[in-house]
Image (cartoon, helix red, strand yellow):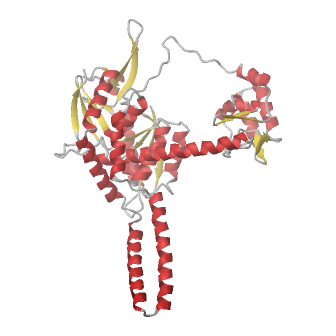
Amino acid sequence: MIGVIYARYSPGPHQTDQSIEGQVAECQEYAERHDIQIVEVYADRHVSGKRVEGRYEFQRMLRDAEAGKFEAVIVWKIDRFGRDRQDIALGKLKLKRAGVRLMYAAESVPDGPEGIVLESVLEGIAEYYSAELRQKIIRGQRETLKKGLYSGAPLPIGYKVVDRRVVPDPETAPLVVEIFERYANGEKMKNLVALLNDRGVTTTRGGKVVPSVVYRMLRNEHYLGIFDRSGIELRVEPIVTPELFEAVAACFPQKHQNAAGRASTDFLLSCKCFCGYCGTMLVGESGRGKMGVVYYYYKCGARKRGSKCELKPVRKELIEDAVISATMQDMLSDETIADLTEEILRIQEEESPDPAEPFRKMLDGNRRKQKNVLAAIEEGSGAVGLARRLAELEKEEKDLQARIVRENVKRPRLKRETIEGWLKGFRGGDVTDPDFVARLLDTFVAKVDVRNDVAVIYYNISEKKRSASGVRIRNVKWR
């Protein structure tokens, strides 16, 4: 697995680079124990975790995640990733969409287990609004494209926009044709990259051209003059002829599947399963039986690397089915949902007080003043001056009401019915749907310790009689 480390320390007289070094050292040790290859370290120094703004390394890490440069992010503790639940949820959502796991080096179960559920609720709400916004954007793009106009999507090198229409760029379009012709005639990729950089060509974002940019260019069907956006086809003037495009396509090496098949599968407990004997994270692998059937297993990472360990390979479907079944049974009861809801509301109040509360208090004071002014007017004393004062208070009232609405939009407060409804929504989920199961496990399961016949599940809810880990645990037979 390819991974990176993110470290951060806040402003303060006792905060130094040693804090970063200590975090990175523990994350490196965690990566070595679990066979994760670290390719980059992102570090924000003297930066608060309360907001994403100003955390430039954090933002760079998210961009690199979206670019597919790694598979996991390791942080020392969850508070290094962030201190605001809403920002944590949005950051985790971006990582999840990029297929990247967030892992904690110093916390087998992150602090405040119900806080993880709160983050999942916020993630779900953010994803809902994101999908809704995306649908609105797509509708707008479709209407724009129907008129033959540019919809705002990034354009490949060689095209530009003139009067809201996509046309070939007279400066770079001939270069595109030259790149296609040279590659078709056997020119090496490094020479094509050098040619574009020497001519001052940059990517859409102004970056330097690298081999992957040229590779995508040579496979980009937009150069045939066909732009398919949101299900609407936009025809523009082509830069490359179909014959030249096919000649280039024929030059690419063909991928071959070997006899083993290359079938991929989702290991739903990936990064949550640990060996109950040596503590090493389990990794997924496959094997072929005598009849040619492919079987999938979880295997102790230490044993896979040659170390001795008691844990035998664990059949994927057996352990996953046992954990999923136990989670549905344990975490979706009325009692558990009620407990979780109470804890989430408490955490929300402790960590993120209502941002509109100060303005509500000011609004209450404003209305008391208005009531007093009206009473004075009724008594007939200083009516003209009091009327002017009443008008000022009424204007202030409208301003405060608008400010309350803005604060609520900016930082929405989760209500009891919203949390309960979201949690109860899992009851109707399809356990054969990998996306649903992944959401279920990410929300409720902190980790699973696996032995040869039993698994210990650590849930994201505090045990009333608090176990050593501080979370509710459950033993489940899986073999």
Residue 49: image quadrant is bottom left
Decide: is 304 above or below 61. Answer: above
Quadrant containing the C terminus in the rendered view: top left
Quadrant of the drawing holding the N terminus: top left
What is the x, y in percent for residue 347?
31, 54
Seen as rendered, the residue at the extreme top is 291
Location of residue 468 in the rendering, given as x and y in whole percent from the top left corner = 20, 43
The residue shown at (38%, 9%) is: 289
Total label count? 0
For residue 353, side relative to residue 192 (left or right): left
Of residues 369 and 117, the one nearer the viewer is 369
Question: In the displayed structure, would residue 63 be above or below residue 374?
Answer: above
Instruction: Specify the quadrant of the image occupied by residue 298.
Output: top left
Left or right of 342 on screen, residue 124? right
Q: Residue furthest bottom?
A: 381
Residue 461 seen by the camera: yes
Q: Which residue is pictured at 47% across the width and 79% down the height?
A: 393
Q: Where residue 411 sits in the image (x, y, percent)?
A: 44, 57
Q: What residue appears at the point 82 percent right and 35 percent down from the top-left corner? A: 174
Depth check, front residue: 84 or 136: 136
Please report the residue visible at 22 percent of the width from the left and 23 percent of the height from the top.
453
As displayed, is residue 185 above or below residue 128? above
x, y (%) of residue 243?
Answer: 79, 22
State the residue in front, 179 or 318: 318
Q: Looking at the image, which is closer to me, 306 or 168?
A: 168
Left or right: 396, with 152 as reference point: left
Q: Is residue 315 visible?
A: no
